[in-house]
Image: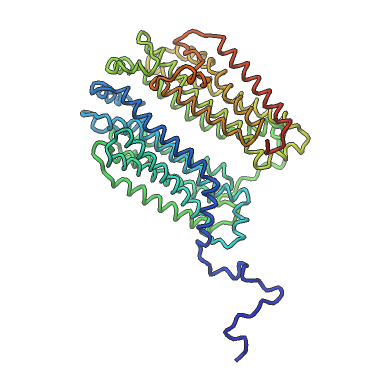
Amino acid sequence: MSATTGATSAPTPGTPGPTHRAARTSASPLEGLGFLLRVNLRISRRQIIVWALAFLAMIPSSVLAMEAAYPDQGALDARARLLDNPSAVMMTGPAFATDDYTFWAMVANELFLYVLIPAAIMAILLSVRHTRGDEEAGRLEMLRALPVGSFAPTAAAMLLVAIASLALGIVTAAGLLLAGGPVTDSLAMAAATGLTGLLFGAVAAVAAQVTEHAGSASGMSLGVLALAVVVRGFGDVIDRQGSWLSWSSPIAWAQQMRLYVDLRWWPLLVTVAVTILLLLIAVQLSQRRDLGAGLRAARPGPGHASMLLRTPGGLARRLLTPMLLAWTIGLGLFAIGFGTLASSLDDMVAEIPAMGEWVPLDMEDLTTSFAAVLLTMLALGPVGLLVAGILRLRTEEMEGRLAGVLLAGRSRTRVAGIWLLVVVIAVLAIQVLLGLAVGVGLWAATEDAAWIGELTLASLAYLPGILLCGAVAFALYGIRARAATLAWALVIWTAIVTFLGGLMDLPDAASALSPLWHVPLVPDAGWEAAPLLLMTGISAVLIGLGLLAMRRRDLAGG
């Protein structure tokens, strides 16, 4: 018997050592899962905390707003009658127990959809960020050089999404309970919120296996979410308590729990089962493709870039068009839908006189006043799009791609200035289209086509306020790239002032921090040139400051 039998011989030169793949083939497919999860948590902990705090602030404040808007049973009955309008059903959810409509049944009907949607968006973004995003950036290839199992990256990403969804579920429960919600139903709503988020995270995990780019995976997943919302809406229009079509939407599975009316838990089992199925599909698909590739090969582009694409403006247009187009379609549909609610205003305000205390409605001309308030609320969409479009330039810089553009001999201020111009033109055009869409909705409700031109013109009043929010983001980006995300604080505060400012009775000094607060409520109010010109001037100064500061700092630095 050889002396080496039963012993481990030293590797000879050229023989793979124990750290090479040949010696690790028997390792667990989940090896390194804990390490990857800790890395993911460290990277995304701030985003998760921000989402959780936003939910914790949004939910109880929304319930308090509803308490002020619907102070008695007469107001609740009027709200129940509003559900005869298909647009109201499309934008809320199925209507249960409308003959004996309680406050908390109304909360579930009015609030639940707008809790489920952001929970799903958060899960999609996190899932794509830690699957296809890491793979596209090359980080996953570096991690796979370590002792990491084949299933570990996908499992770590989905565990992170599960932790984030659990956090949202916990703060949802806390917010509802702080507002006085019944315990069992509030916990059920929290569980549905977390599980629906996890389900769409699994949708994103599957999309990440199909496509080669993170942007495509996010777009595909958000498209599934949008389709789920629309299908649920049409299904509930067919039958106010949910039709066969409603049940084909994951959003409906949560809403069909009959929260605060006749609680049933079993629809959550459908959500859990589909989530598990999607995760298994994602894991299996990940084994059928090469690292960095998608199951669906990207279409080869042209051999040479067009002259337009080789300019900073053409590049900005190419990168931002999918996001801007998707949000324009979604916001436009909401604008038309909300506009059609004008036909129900008189009856609703007659039953809910307190509405005028927290929404600036002119009781003598409800339709015009409602249109002005609606334009203000919808202007938040272009505000967010403008900030997001400017921050996309920050992403290009942080990822190192902007440096490649600058190597072609263009100055950074010229690139940033043209990028800003493209985003501003696109977003301001979207604002005008939203005014047109609201006009179409009111035309459908009142049969008066004059609303289309009047509200399209009125939408122009919001352009300086929208531009000022973008100018703040651009100035922060110019001063320090990493500080640019602080612009979202202004967006959030603007949304709080717009939706809850009247209810919270905020002092003028606090409300004045919102640029939209300075916009006259046209067409209900007259045009005031002074605040619009002042905001335009401040925007010009901030943009100039951003360009000047950008010349004085290093790329991806301060």
Outermost residue, bottom side:
1
Q: Is residue 425 left or right of residue 162?
A: right
Picture layout, residue 398 above or below residue 411: below
Q: Residue at x 69, y 77 (%)?
A: 12
Question: Where residue 392 appears, x then y in whole percent?
Answer: 61, 35
Q: Is residue 160 left or right of residue 311?
A: left
Q: Is residue 43 visible?
A: yes
Question: Where residue 60 appears, x then y in whole percent?
Answer: 36, 32
Question: Where residue 400 appears, x then y in whole percent?
Answer: 68, 42
Q: Is residue 90 visible?
A: no
- By what rule are the colours in the image chosen? rainbow
Picture layout, residue 124 above or below residue 7: above
Q: Residue at x 39, y 50 (%)?
A: 274
Outermost residue, right side:
409
User: Which quarter of the rendered picture does the N terminus lie within?
Assistant: bottom right
Q: Residue at x 59, y 13 (%)?
A: 534
**Which corner quadrant of the image does residue 393 belong to?**
top right
